[in-house]
Image (spheres, grey):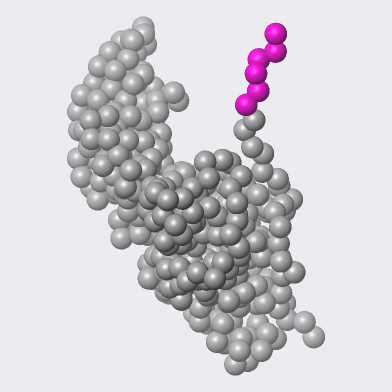
Amino acid sequence: MAVKKSYEEINEKIRNGTAVVVTAEEVIDIVKEKGIEEATKHVDVVTTATFGPMCSSGAFLNFGHSDPPIKMSKVHLNGVPAYSGLAAVDVYIGATEESEDKGMEYGGAHVICDLIDGKKIHLMATARGTDCYPCKEVETYITKESINEAYLFNPRNCYQNYNAAINTSDRRIYTYMGILQPDRGNVTYSTAGQLSPLFNDPLYRTIGIGTRIFLGGTVGYISWQGTQFNSGCDRDEKGVPLGGAGTLAVIGDLKNMSTEYIKPAVFEKYGTSIFVGIGIPIPILDEEMMRYVSVEDKDLHTNIIDYSVPRRSKPSLGRVSYAELRSGKVTVDGKEIKTAPMSSLHKARRIADELKDWIQKGDFQIQEPVQPLPLNNKLNSLEIVEEEA
């Protein structure tokens, strides 16, 4: 008889302290020992995690009203421009926005993390002035305690799969995948492999809109499909995508986050980014979910893409497994090439363990999605079109 569990049954076990919770790495050995059916009976929740650069991130902030009030038009936080085309004192600061005086060495990611750490942030705002908002300039200092709302809202995080990067040109190039050495000198990649959330739920059965997650050290939620959501991509016979696929838009309270799990980054000669820690629990509803979460790095593959080609469509030099990438070297066209991760497996493991601990203590229950993510979404490209006469 097939094993079936409901969200309510699993949450009841979490509430009374009897739920069996393991990480996506731990479950692999459990399945090998017990088999799919018995492992499904035994395990209730599997925790997944990733910690890597996620450029499409930022924060909404509300400063409260000054006296006299101002309708902010141009806003700078520690010299970094923030977008103010919202309401009078609401702004959005993007992680990759760069300081106007320090350049890429200090950007929106640094402002976000300085806020999380409780540091004072210099606020400079100007406006044209209106009858109801007569003030034309404000200069002051803010902290996360002095402002109203401060929440992270990231339009595109947690890629389901991502290409590995290589450089076949005769010069070093500087990218968001790090420094790529000439003549196929190295390969970089940025996915947590068998621990990564969307690899463990490839067809989005339990991960959807409304899912409660670990985000930057606190509780967050999946708010929508992420931008560039490409679920209608090529997949293997188990439904695992062979390249970039699903992404997640996520939200959480910045005031409760920790810079242990969210950190600014500067990529040499490229720009500012931010490392974001995300953990997602997967309820084991049935044997199919157990098969999904017992996936191993050796069964997960990505493409090695030549980043030296300055075109939207870049050539692939072949496909490799994450086990090969994790080994520290891959072979491309007969040449052995060093590999290096852009994401941190060490941090991902810490996140998966911390989320596991929250669930075991009864502090975190599993939220059934209120709406599934689309399965056959295609990705559009920007075409340059000349204006018609």
Which residue is located at x 71 percent, y 78 percent?
287
Residue 53 on the magenta span:
no
Q: In this picture, is 296 found above or below 56?
A: below
Image quarter where the C terminus lies is top right
238 horizontally vs 180: left or right: right
97 horizontally vs 295: left or right: left
Give 52 or 1, whichever is nearer the viewer: 52
**Image location of residue 178, percent across then percent down:** 39, 53
46 horizontally vs 169: left or right: right
Which residue is located at x 19 percent, y 28 percent?
140
Query: Magenta region, mostly helix, strand or loop?
Result: loop
Residue 388 on the magenta span:
yes
Which residue is located at x 40 percent, y 25 percent?
84
Give 104 or 87, whichever is nearer the viewer: 104
Q: Which residues are magenta?
A: 384-389
Q: In this picture, is 51 found above or below 169?
A: below
Is there any visible trace of residue 120 in the rendered image?
yes
Q: In this picture, is 198 found above or below 14?
A: above
Is there any visible trace of residue 214 in the rendered image?
no
Which residue is located at x 29 percent, y 18 percent?
126
Image quarter where the N terminus lies is bottom right
